[in-house]
Amino acid sequence: MDYQREYQARLRSAGEAVQVVKSGDWIDYGWCTCAPDALDRALAARYHQLFDVKVRGAVLMSRPAILSVPDTAEHFIWNSWHMGGLERRLIDEGVAYYIPLRYSELPRYYQENVDSVHVAMVQVSPMDEDGYFSCGLNASHLRALFERAEVTILEVNVNYPRCCGGEDARIHISQVDMVVEGDNPPLQELPAAPASDVDRKVASLIVSQIPDGACLQLGIGGMPNAVGSLIAQSDLKDLGVHTEMYVDAFVDMAMAGKITGRRKAIDTGRQVYAFGAGTQKLYDYLRENPDCFAASVGYTNDARTIAQLDHFISINNAVDVDLFGQVNAESSGIRHISGSGGQQDFVLGAYLSKGGKSFICCSSTTTDKDGTLKSRICPVLKEGSVVTDTRCNLHYLVTEYGMVNLKGASTWERAERIISIAHPDFREDLIRDAQRMKIWRRSQKR
């Protein structure tokens, strides 16, 4: 088969390709670093011709051109599966909205519950000799997206790494309607925040609970970065990776020889992930690395998959936690911050794993803009805050003041344990709140 001939037959300029978009369409920008660049700019140039175009995507790394046109909300609206700092600002501007979901369900959403995808446009690697483009850096749900889309447009970027994976991590030229050769911008980077003293203290408590041969899932941020650094310097060995997001911390651990995956019951020897985002170090590491395997999030985040991996260790962050053990990792009151993502998937899956543990981590306090110190451990969650993990699901809770296991604990026991790792300045007030809510025993206070 002459795949180059097929390629040339589908080749268009970005301006030509976006002519397929019509007012009222639902279009899709994929996930994270695969959001289009040249196609986005070409679409924005047509803004005066287009109205009420609804765009889906997630974890924006830079502001799309379509969201910088005059009277943006009349022309384009962003609908996000998961949000970062940029998208929070877009909510404030009235041009972005969140789509609630458990990340593991996203492929099925496209197959069964998304009404329409008129046009899908994403960045991919150059085509190989067999006619395949790699989308493995963001395997996520893209196969389901391509199957659902009426029109699929690929924007080729030589800087997009070809990643190892199965059918969920690639698309064949025969499945593509149009190909655009973009300007090959470097991939946007998402460096982890520097680890604070609190992050390092929390990380040290968690690392002490990780056995040789454990399988790891990490979120992004200073604390997971600190966990990775400590593991890289530890005596731990034969660790495995099975995660939704591949972050720089995994690269550090792998380069230190801590990751072999040889004790994994499934995907033995492979680091499995749904998408990767970080620094250029990460992109270079994932490029054609046979030790790493990109898979659908419907596989990586399925609790039934996670349960097959013994000693599964899940580590995620929280915005705040209440005395009942309800975890909010998505909002501050009604102000949206991120999304449900895969946190609940991994909290549930880790507990189903033989010897598995899930850790929800947060600093005990945060400081407001006016300098006021506030406790992240609250009597009840702030009105409007989202419950990401229910009180039934929470396993370990960790702050810089300690680690507590809440499984099987009654309401008064969990209140006691949660307060014990709150900042000391807030403990007396929290005890009074617990008494008021009738989840405190007087005999506990000594």
Image: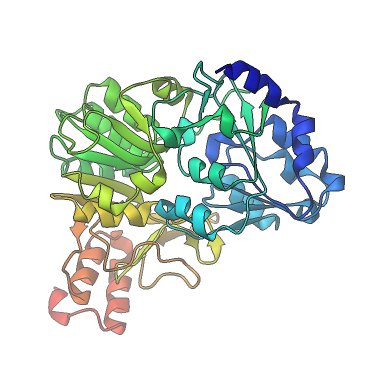
Asked if residue 382 shows in the view, the reply is yes
Please tell me whether residue 219 is drawn above or below residue 234 in the rendered image: below
Q: Is residue 305 left or right of residue 3?
A: left
Front-lying residue, 262 or 225:
262
Residue 443 position within the rendered picture, expressed as x and y whole percent measured from the top left: 12, 79
Asked if residue 400 shows in the view, the reply is no
Q: Quadrant of residue 37?
A: top right
Residue drawn at x 71%, y 36% as measured from the top left: 40
Give the residue at the far right of this rendering: 48
Name the quadrant of the N terminus: top right
Front-lying residue, 389 or 269:
269
Residue 17 position within the rendered picture, expressed as x and y whole percent measured from the top left: 74, 33
Front-lying residue, 56 or 396:
56
Give the residue at the far front of this rendering: 1
Please tell me whether residue 72 is drawn above or below residue 327 in the rendered image: above
- Image colouring: rainbow
Front-lying residue, 13 or 343:
13
Please tell me whether residue 107 is drawn above or below residue 414 in the rendered image: above
**Total number of numbered discs in the rendering:** 0
Residue 52 position within the rendered picture, expressed as x and y whole percent measured from the top left: 76, 56
Residue drawn at x 50%, y 70% as measured from the top left: 384
Please tell me whether residue 272 is drawn above or below residue 313 in the rendered image: above
Residue drawn at x 62%, y 31% as measured from the top left: 154
Q: Quadrant of residue 422?
A: bottom left
Residue 446 position within the rendered picture, expressed as x and y whole percent measured from the top left: 13, 73
Q: Is residue 207 left or right of residue 105?
A: left
